[in-house]
Amino acid sequence: MRQRFSPDHYVTGILAGDRLLLSRAITLVESRRPDDQALAQQVLDAILPKTGQSVRIGITGVPGVGKSTFIEAFGTYLTTLGHRLAVLTVDPTSQRSGGSLLGDKTRMETLSMHPAAYIRPSPAGDSLGGVAHRTRESMLLCEAAGFDVILVETVGVGQSETVVHGMVDFFLLLMLAGAGDELQGMKRGIMELADALVITKADGDNQAPANRARVEYQNALHLFPPTDTGWFPPVLMCSALTSVGITGVWQTIQQQQQLTIQNGYRNRRRQHQQLAWFRSLLRQKIEGRFYDQPGIRDQLASIETQVQNGILLPAPAVDRLLNPLSDF
Amino acid sequence: MRQRFSPDHYVTGILAGDRLLLSRAITLVESRRPDDQALAQQVLDAILPKTGQSVRIGITGVPGVGKSTFIEAFGTYLTTLGHRLAVLTVDPTSQRSGGSLLGDKTRMETLSMHPAAYIRPSPAGDSLGGVAHRTRESMLLCEAAGFDVILVETVGVGQSETVVHGMVDFFLLLMLAGAGDELQGMKRGIMELADALVITKADGDNQAPANRARVEYQNALHLFPPTDTGWFPPVLMCSALTSVGITGVWQTIQQQQQLTIQNGYRNRRRQHQQLAWFRSLLRQKIEGRFYDQPGIRDQLASIETQVQNGILLPAPAVDRLLNPLSDF
């Protein structure tokens, strides 16, 4: 980062919708330098009262499902309705895949040029928890900058969907037609997190398979018990190519928002998310203190090998680690 | 507990298959007294080399699905094959429901009288984690006492299925016919943990609905990606009344065991379970040390309220708790 400003300078800029200062503030949030973190925290504390006014939407799906294309079409549609849209990416694999972030940027070219849209890929993170904390904070900064729809995008692998589900009001799962194979590579249980399923690429020859997949998924969703939201996740179809179904996705999100704002669920969901975020951070810090003790990691590795091989039971193993001077 | 013995006395008794000493050792494991815990640990350490030789089976299902009746029929069948069977119950609700444990005992009356069967309901626990640790240790004691099939039973509510899934080789989900309603009250995602689904009470007028439910669940299971075990969970039907299907359940378990022992998955699953058990215990102890500090719980409650209401961000909230003398 080339330059740092006073907290007030960031805050004033962000509240005025200055994208350059918004971007710099997010970079600050993502920085690991303690002084940057302290500065970022001051900015976050100051903008906090101006946050929470957006619709927070999580989007996931396996690679190849057409996430970027969908977001491009969906986002462009939202801007025509007068919405201001921020797109944040949570990609725990980006450290390895390297070029994927640039790839995303290129693919969402039209949207990224739009004055009412802001696209911010997260940098590679060494821990998903870390990425997630920064994404939550980036979301707050975007809200303070006046974006009223936030899309948080993640790839449908690993733990990232659960993490993203924990920071949004609506969780959208993109699926490909071709029943049987389409969940390949996707973590089990993700379908149950979804507030809606959208079958993408429902155009041309793919329309009939998409329709079959829709019925199949709708049946499968009926096997799950209803959630306590009063919302029943629908299965939709869309095509970014023909733009069919894009408006339906937005209508669905609005219906769910109306319902859950009215019945108090959205507020409870957010309160629950805040608390879970705090507890996860607290747990990380408490454990961090323990693991940062000199020599503890080597000792842990040796003890874990013994536990894994069934030579040592967990309880005495924990004692040995916590009370190195005890009898064990 | 009326009386305590030397560690050797317990160990010798357990290895000789003495049920009274087995029961007393489990009571010791379940005791919260530090001296009992130390004694229990000595016993556990000594019997550890004699454990691991059983088939560990988890059984769950919503109340009313007929778990006790199934276990009675299934367990009696196993004893006719010459197996020695231990049934352990993990019931996080037992503290509240009070009489349920006695109820279980009564319902499994025939089995509980059988010389080759041992039934042990867990006492009410204040934390599910705690119950689980004790159940794992009780399982080891039962193995050392020569039981070669261990059933760990849990009610299909809350977190207990995940916990039980984390300590067994085979996870059996009992279901009722009557598609659509039968997952009511069952935690989402449990179906994905199952190594087999069994539709109970498939007799009389219920046979046709059971058949329909079987097809429906088998279809639903096909939507999930295959696990890395090479095992595909089947949907079976059985009736404890007519005894139909009971042998099929045992054949299925044996097939899965053959497969997973051969391909190394069972061993990896157990190693993974041991490690997860250790890490969860370590985390509990590390966090316990933190929360046991004087005054910390009151402070935490007040901070959590502020976080939940969006007045305080998680990061400064954690700082405030961990560094009470800092600027915040």
Image: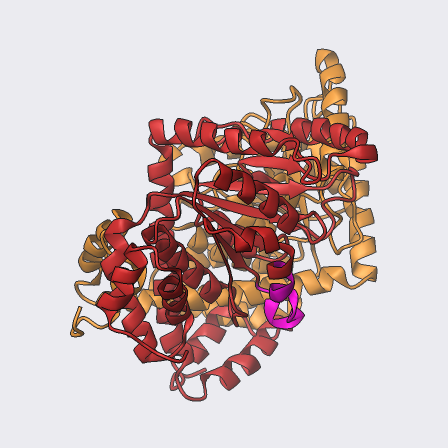
Chain colours: A orange, B red
B122 inside magenta stretch: no
Q: Nearer the viewer, residue A48 or B20?
A: B20
Which contiguous range is marked in magenta?
B92-104
B93 inside magenta stretch: yes
Q: Residue at x 61, y 36 (%)?
A: B197
- Residue A203: x, y in percent? 73, 18
Residue A65 as seen in the image, left or right of residue B49: right
Measured along the vertical axis of the image, is residue B126 above or below residue A234? below
Q: Residue at x 45, y 33 (%)?
A: A100
Q: Quadrant of residue A233?
A: top right
- Residue A104: x, y in percent? 52, 33
Measured along the vertical axis of the image, is residue A327 above or below residue B215? below
Quarter of the image that includes the C terminus of chain B: bottom left
Q: Residue at x 52, y 70 (%)?
A: B125
| Secondary structure mostly taken by the magenta-highlighted segment of the chain | helix
- Residue B259: x, y in percent? 41, 27
Measured along the vertical axis of the image, is residue A257 above or below residue A8? above
